[in-house]
Amino acid sequence: MPSVRQSVTPRTTGEASSGGQEAAAPRRRSTQASGRTRVIAVANQKGGVGKTTTAVNVAAALAELGTSVLLIDADPQGNASTALGIDHHADVVGTYDVLTDAAPLESAVVECADVPGLWCCPATVDLAGAEIELVSMGGRESQMRRAVEELVGSGRESKTSFEVVLLDCPPSLGLITVNALTAAREVLVPIQCEYYALEGVTQLLRSIALVRERYNDDLHVSAMVLTMFDGRTRLSSQVAEEVRAHFPEQVFDQTIPRSVRVSEAPSHGQTVMTYDPTSSGALAYRAVAAELLERRPA
Ligand SMILES: Nc1ncnc2c1ncn2[C@@H]1O[C@H](COP(=O)(O)OP(=O)(O)O)[C@@H](O)[C@H]1O
Ligand SMILES: [Mg+2]
């Protein structure tokens, strides 16, 4: 299938030297161990908890802070692509092609028009079929990891130098999510401030442990972000308290408020960072992005 758009090459962001750590790094973790690119899966198998909203807004906020970011839309719904105003109709080269070896990741990435420094690998409808197609492929859980490593690669010859790669996962623990978790070193878990917030988190953690054991020994949950927090209700505060009690290390200080501006932005093909830069949601996501940079893993 011909591509409808030319391939683009991400801008070089200058000296992202690995300081010679690559040679000493274990082969399995060469990409992340270089200390150059953080690969973060935004995951929670529950739908509607704010994964996509968090992925796109954190990505935009990071780019605003001068960080070069790639957001890989790994959800067949393509909501992240929509929110970034990135074309993702059926003929576009995207995550499906990357997962099925039809195209290298570099040929699928496009820069977001509104946010310089933010790139996206879009998800098209055929990504839904990838779950099935991957089953018969050898190394099926490592397809994304290979693609990401090839892109950010050794850092020697690559023209690209993304400092952060975010993967927006679908609401399931299927093969696409397993691919994202195998490619990542960190997991960011958005948790909606509502009843049963922690329901399913145990299952997610079990899956993460399984992926760590089998495919990716460095994987860890580095961030939990409380989303749709409503300061006027006792429920939000109670949930936040409970989640913090369970995961004192991982839960970010900054919470994301429930905000109409946040939910409106995608329908304008924008993140809240550009749609309403001074809104409470934009300020909160900016603070989360700053916290993410501060909490850089060792
Ligand atoms: N902080 C927020 N305030 C208001 N609405 C939000 C907020 N975060 C997410 N939403 C809305 O909640 C719904 C689910 O969010 P989304 O990010 O798509 O979740 P997921 O990717 O986990 O399925 C969307 O309609 C989104 O606009
Ligand atoms: Mg989503």
Image: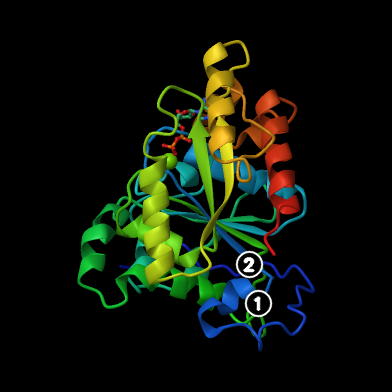
Looking at the picture, the colour scheme in use is rainbow
Residue wearing tag 1: 159
Q: Position of residue 188 (x, y in %)?
A: 54, 48
Q: Amino acid at mark 2?
A: Pro
Q: Nearer the viewer, residue 228 or 273?
A: 228
Q: Position of residue 28 (x, y in %)?
A: 50, 80
Residue at horizontal 37 percent and vertical 50 percent from the top: 89
Write the residue at 42% across / 41% down. Answer: 201
Would you identify the image quadrant in which residue 287 lies? top right
Marked residue nearer the N-terminal end (1 or 2): 2
Q: Position of residue 11 (x, y in %)?
A: 69, 67
Three-letter amino acid code at the position of disc 1: Lys
Name which residue lies at 74% across and 85% down: 20
Determine the residue located farthest toward the front in the rendered image.
Answer: 245
Question: Disc 2 designates what residue?
Answer: 10
Residue 165 left/right relative to 76:
right
Q: CA distance from mark 1 to mark 2?
A: 7 Å
Crowding near pointer 1: few (<14 within 10 Å), some, many (20+)?
some
Q: Is residue 252 above or below residue 183?
A: above
User: Could one spot residue 170 in this view of the protein?
Assistant: no
Q: Secondary structure at mark 1?
A: loop
- Asked whether the residues under the numbered discs 1 and 2 touch, taking CB atoms below 8 Å apart as contact, a structural biologist would say yes
